[in-house]
Amino acid sequence: DRLLNENEEIQGSVNQLIRRLLDRQGITEAQLRSGNLDQIDVDEIAREKAKELIGPGGPLSAEAVSDRIVNFSIAAFGGDKSKIDIIRNAIDRGFDEAKQILGELSDVSKETYDLIQEKLDQWVNDGETTTPETTHDEAS
């Protein structure tokens, strides 16, 4: 529940960022849905807010996203380390699908993937993730 609530809050922040950007440009939701837009310019206000979201300590930073993915994965499989291959395959599939949609992934996405793998390795080898919120014992 905590992870779902966090995701909803983050999604709300991103949606608000986009809505405000569109509002500043006078673009309505109807225009956006119609696809009759030549271009949407990302202004400095939106650029700075996005940097805050993905920067160190931000809710969409590589560290924060990797924590959520690892914590969810461990909890979803009841802390069962024998499921590590299923977890890794699911994560790989998700990142592969993102690549198909977006093309080349951003540096923050690549860093997120690497951190996920490191944290899963630590969980499998040490019995704990690198995140303070969820350890193997708490996930089971």
Image: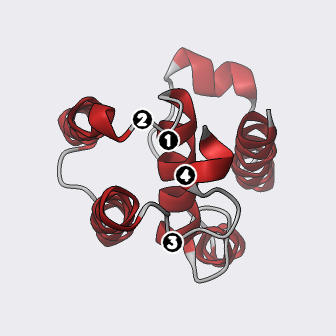
The front one of 32 and 115 is: 115
Which kind of residue does numbered mark 3 sit on?
Thr
The answer to whether marks 1 and 3 mark residues whose Cβ atoms lie closer than 8 Å is: no
The answer to whether marks 3 and 2 mark residues whose Cβ atoms lie closer than 8 Å is: no
The front one of 64 and 15 is: 64
Sequence-first tag of 1 and 3: 1
Which residue does the image show at 72% across and 74% down from the upper left?
Answer: 45
Secondary element at tag 4: helix
Quadrant containing the C terminus in the rendered view:
top right
Q: Residue 136 shows which numbered tag?
A: 4
Q: CA distance from mark 4 to mark 2?
A: 9 Å
Residue at mark 2: 80
Secondary element at tag 3: loop
Which residue does the image show at 79% across and 32% down from the upper left?
Answer: 1
Q: Residues within 10 Å of mark 2 (few under 14, many from 20)?
A: some
Residue 42 position in % (x across, y down): 56, 63
Mark 3 or mark 2, which is nearer to you? 2
Q: Residue furthest bottom?
A: 56
Q: CA distance from mark 2 to mark 1?
A: 7 Å
Location of residue 28 by image quarter: top right
Residue at mark 1: 74
Sequence-first tag of 3 and 2: 2
Sequence-first tag of 4 and 2: 2
The front one of 129 and 57 is: 129
Q: CA distance from mark 3 to mark 2?
A: 17 Å
Residue at mark 3: 130
